[in-house]
Image (cartoon, grey):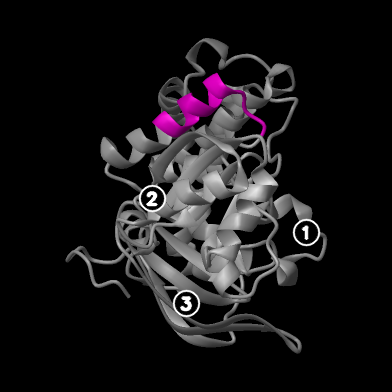
Amino acid sequence: MDGEGDSTPIITARSLGKMYGPHMALEDVNLEIPPGAVGVLGPNGAGKSTLFKCLLGLITTTSGEGTVLGYDIRTEGDKIRSRIGYMPEYDALDPDLSAIDQVRYAGELVGMNPAHATRRAHEVLQYVGLKEQRYRKIETYSTGMKQAAKLACALVHDPDVLICDEPTNGLDQKAREFMLQTLRRTVSDGNRSVLMSSHVMDDVQEVCERIVMIHKGRIVVQRRIEDLARQIEREIEISVWGGASRMQQELETRGFKVRRLGRVLRVDRVDEGTTKEVLEAAVSANVQVRQMREYEPDLEDIFLLIMERLGAEVRGTSDLMTTAHTGGDRDE
């Protein structure tokens, strides 16, 4: 626990475990999530979906206990689900329905009467930018409009917590920016909490203040993003011309650990003398340094570094994509 703030947690878990036969999907999970926006990260197969299903009371835990909004996940799943909005990654819309009918129906499924559900459907479709298209059939919608319609379905009953799985998947830049803006507004203006699972680290960083990272069924990180960034060693980023491989070899000969991205190399900033030593290495390697600057780590750097420290074989953040798995709940 990071112990920050005094807000009552919206989600808690104590020694939570889930077995699928001999397979341990969740092991000794301890969580304390405060209100706000939280990114839920982890490689494919880490246990993210199993954790969500346990917290929603959709599957029975093997051990431990937990609460969502003060309700017991073991006995009060129906109450929890009535106050949670879920925007799935998969296509959950009926192509033959208009958006207004789809969203109204989603409201009725969680117990709203038809008149109230209809009023709310008009409101949330305007909120997600579909006011002018609300009577069109969903089969005529673009990917961005379908994502917005799914968000409207998740918001129709005015939930306290919104769970979004890959909310910007398949969106162009304009639609992506609008989706992220809407999620931020849901937190800031609507005073709601968002749990967001995404493989696009820039999106998580734009919306979320903190992250929960899960690996092999265990929680390995739950911290504010800015606190994690402060703990990462600062790096010097060098853009070179005429021999990046020679420059890398020279730096490694001098004891630097080099991270290379094409013609761009990064080394840990050891002290004030690091810059001078890098320039000396460039002279020795007979390469031209085009640019050199102190590099501020972003969330993708943090994720990959943590996975590397855990010994995980993660090629990149594309490995977070939940669509890549084929083995059902126990694989995700």
Disc 3 residue type? Thr
Please tell me which residue is depicted at 45% across the width and 22% down the height of the picture. Answer: 122
Does the stretch in magenta take in 302? Answer: no
Which residue is denoted by mark 1 in the rendering? 325
User: What span is in magenta?
Assistant: 170-181
Quadrant containing the C terminus is bottom right
Secondary element at tag 2: helix
State the residue lying farthest toward the top.
132
Query: Which marked residue is nearer to the observer: mark 3 or mark 1?
Result: 1
Secondary element at tag 3: loop
Disc 1 residue type? His
Which corner quadrant of the image does residue 104 belong to? top right
- The percent coordinates of residue 280 (x first, y second) are 47, 50
Dominant secondary structure, magenta: helix
How packed mark 2 is, by other alpha carbons closer than 10 Å (few <14, some 14-19, many 20 or more), is: few
Q: Is residue 320 visible?
A: yes
Q: Earlier in the sequence, mark 3 or mark 1?
A: 3
Secondary element at tag 1: loop
Residue 276 badge: 2
Which residue is denoted by mark 3 in the rendering? 75
Residue 30 vs residue 123, the one in the foreground: 30
Residue 28 left/right relative to 142: left
